[in-house]
Structure formats: structure tokens, C-alpha cells
Image (cartoon, rainbow, N blue to C red):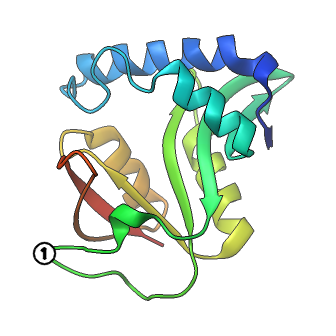
């Protein structure tokens, strides 16, 4: 597998990956985290334009996508029911998903992100059990709870 920055030409494939992810999340008992329309197309276009959107390819086919950025995440400034492992510079992963039926994509993408800076923070919905398992499997520590700008609660992890 290989990681590269997403381009606007990848947008339709990225949108399809998110449609599949929303359906999977709903079937897995997590219908609320991304609902029926998240992430919106405009956000994904902005991620691409800012250079923070990535795709994972296997044999020339896009099998995953995610947002990655080195730097501070404003919603991570306050953490409740725990604390971050450290306050060293970190990278942020958001909106990670993979093509249904593929194996190991999330682990590969997370590993690539970790290799970029050696400290990663990520959050997920309390109902997103598959992602919580993936994070635990990849050596992340559950650090506490953060709240998004809209007040939604998320479980925060760091490695």
C-alpha cells in the first residue's frame, strides 16, 4: 500500500468511500457520528486544497482516505476525565475510512501518520467500537474526553 496526497480528481472516489463508511457505521450501531451527510463535500474539497487530505492506494486503487495534519487541534486544548500522555508536538488524524472488504488499511494509514511525527492524537465517537478496537490494536492510549465545537463528545486517544 502507498499513501499520497489527495487531488481534486480523487473527490468522487473519496465521496464514495464516505458513503460506504456511513452505511457501515449505521449497521455497526453508530448511526450518529457521521449521520447521513458527513463529511460534506465542501469540507473535503477544502482538505484537499489545504494539502491535508490523503488517500491510500493498493495496486493503483484508492482503498482508504484520511485527514492528517501536524499541529494543534483547538478542540484538544481541554481534555476531561483524564489527560494527554504529553504536550509534545503532535499530528492529528480525522475522517479516516477504508473501502469495505479491505483489510489492514486503517492500520497502514495510522502507521504512516505516526511515522511522520512520532506523536498522534485522534478522537472517535463513543459508539464507534470498530475504531476504538483499531486504536487499541495500534498502541493508542485512551486519554479522556474532548468536546467538538458543536458540543459533541468524543473519546480522545494518543500514541
Determine whether the residue tagged by mark 1 lies in a helix, strand or loop.
loop
Residue at mark 1? 81
Residue at position x 53%, y 53% in the image: 93
Q: Position of residue 117 (x, y in %)?
A: 68, 73
Q: Nearer the viewer, residue 135 or 35?
A: 35
Q: Is residue 94 left or right of residue 117?
A: left
Number of numbered discs visible in the structure rendering: 1
Q: Residue furthest left?
A: 81
Residue at position x 75%, y 45% in the image: 51
Q: Quadrant of the N terminus?
A: top right
- Can I make out residue 98 in this image? no
Q: Is residue 141 above or below residue 112?
A: below
Mark 1 closeness class: few <14, some 14–19, many ≥20 residues within 10 Å: few
Residue at position x 58%, y 29% in the image: 44
Q: Position of residue 126 (x, y in %)?
A: 18, 47
- Can I make out residue 149 in this image? yes
Q: Is residue 143 above or below residue 41?
A: below
Q: Position of residue 17 (x, y in %)?
A: 55, 18
* Among the 4 quarters of the image, the one containing residue 142: bottom left
* Among the 4 quarters of the image, the one containing residue 24: top left
Q: Position of residue 54 (x, y in %)?
A: 71, 40
Q: Is residue 2 above or below residue 86?
A: above
* Among the 4 quarters of the image, the one containing residue 14: top right
Residue at position x 59%, y 44% in the image: 67
Amino acid at each position: 500500500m502507498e499513501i499520497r496526497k489527495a487531488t481534486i480528481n480523487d473527490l468522487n472516489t473519496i465521496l464514495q468511500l464516505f458513503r460506504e463508511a456511513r452505511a457501515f457505521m449505521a449497521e455497526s450501531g453508530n448511526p450518529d457520528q457521521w449521520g447521513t451527510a458527513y463529511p460534506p463535500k465542501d469540507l473535503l474539497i477544502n482538505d484537499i486544497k489545504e494539502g491535508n487530505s490523503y488517500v491510500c492506494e493498493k495496486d493503483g486503487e484508492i482503498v482508504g482516505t484520511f485527514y492528517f495534519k501536524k499541529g494543534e487541534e483547538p478542540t484538544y486544548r481541554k481534555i476531561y476525565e483524564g489527560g494527554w500522555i504529553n504536550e509534545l508536538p503532535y499530528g492529528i488524524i480525522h475522517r479516516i475510512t477504508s473501502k469495505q472488504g479491505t483489510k489492514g488499511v486503517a492500520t497502514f494509514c495510522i502507521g504512516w501518520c505516526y511515522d511522520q511525527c512520532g506523536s498522534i492524537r485522534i478522537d472517535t465517537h463513543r459508539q464507534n467500537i470498530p475504531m476504538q478496537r483499531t486504536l487499541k490494536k495500534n498502541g493508542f492510549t485512551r486519554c479522556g474526553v474532548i468536546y467538538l465545537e458543536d458540543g459533541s463528545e468524543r473519546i480522545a486517544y494518543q500514541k
